[in-house]
Image: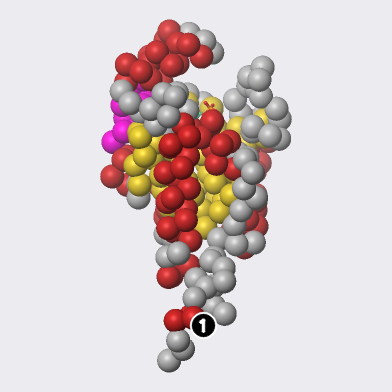
Amino acid sequence: MSDFATACPSASKGFCLVLSAPSGTGKTTVGELLTAGDSTIVRSVSMTTRTKRPNEQDGVDYHFVSPDEFKEKIRQGAFLEWAEVYDGVLYGTPRETVERVIRSGSVALLVIDVQGGRAVKAIFPEAVLVFLVPPSLDTLSRRLRQRGLETDEQIQKRLSKARAEMKYLPAYDYGVGNDEGEQQSTVDAIRGIIAAERRRISRWEPQ
Ligand code: 5GP
């Protein structure tokens, strides 16, 4: 039997970290803070048929494509998972990028909805699912209004969706509160989860 010193890992295997939260919970910012200055956490850039917002960049925030292009990608099997998140709007995680990041021993960060989280767990049971829990639906509603990107009707839709999304919480491995102005502690909590998951013995790379 090898002693503990030689059994200690020099590296862990890469894995998928899914970050989901009701819209307006600030998951985009949390995702950006998590990857900033840490080359071992790589965010997967999803493909979507949604129109680009003024502050967004193609290839950075999303790969913006037409519905026909998206359907072609589905046909080619290019997605790890894809879902219709809002009426007729499709989002998908490119399979190749995620597989490449995992193979390189890094963490592939997927900021995706709850349907996507469940699908990823079915494909990669070793994936880690983190749910950002909003302070309250009232706070969420206020944030969406302040963001000013949507009509009242669209905001109402997002809120009823948020209520439905909260039902997926038990399917997740970790729940992290994300209070306004507390984003750094949310990020620190997720970094702690990643640090622990890297030490999981089943993820140790054989010497
Ligand atoms: P938004 O349009 O506000 O950027 O995103 C809308 C929702 O789609 C968010 O919950 C976001 O996490 C989710 N989303 C973004 N990319 C993907 C993806 O590739 N797959 C899935 N299932 N959801 C995604």
- Residue beneath the point at 38% across and 27% down: 179
Quadrant containing the N terminus is bottom left
Q: Quadrant of the C terminus?
A: bottom right
Range shown magenta: 159-167
As drawn, 68 above or below 14: above
Q: Quick check: 151 above or below 90?
A: above
Q: Is residue 45 magenta?
A: no
Left or right of 117, for residue 39: right
Q: Nearer the viewer, residue 151 or 204?
A: 204
Q: Quickly name the residue at label 1.
A: 6
Q: Which residue sits furthest top?
A: 152
Residue ID at (31%, 30%): 164
Residue positioned 53% across, 66% down in the render: 12
Residue extending furthest right?
58
Vertically, is 129 above or below 144?
below
174 sits left or right of 53 in the view: left
Q: Along the line of sight, which residue is nearer the eye, 157 or 41?
A: 41
Residue 120 is situated, as x and y percent measured from the top left of the image, at 46, 50
In the image as oriented, which residue stretches furthest toward the front?
5
Regarding residue 61, the answer to whether it shows in the image is yes
Q: Secondary structure at mark 1?
A: helix
Q: Residue at x 33, y 26 (%)?
A: 135
Q: Position of residue 125 (x, y in %)?
A: 42, 59
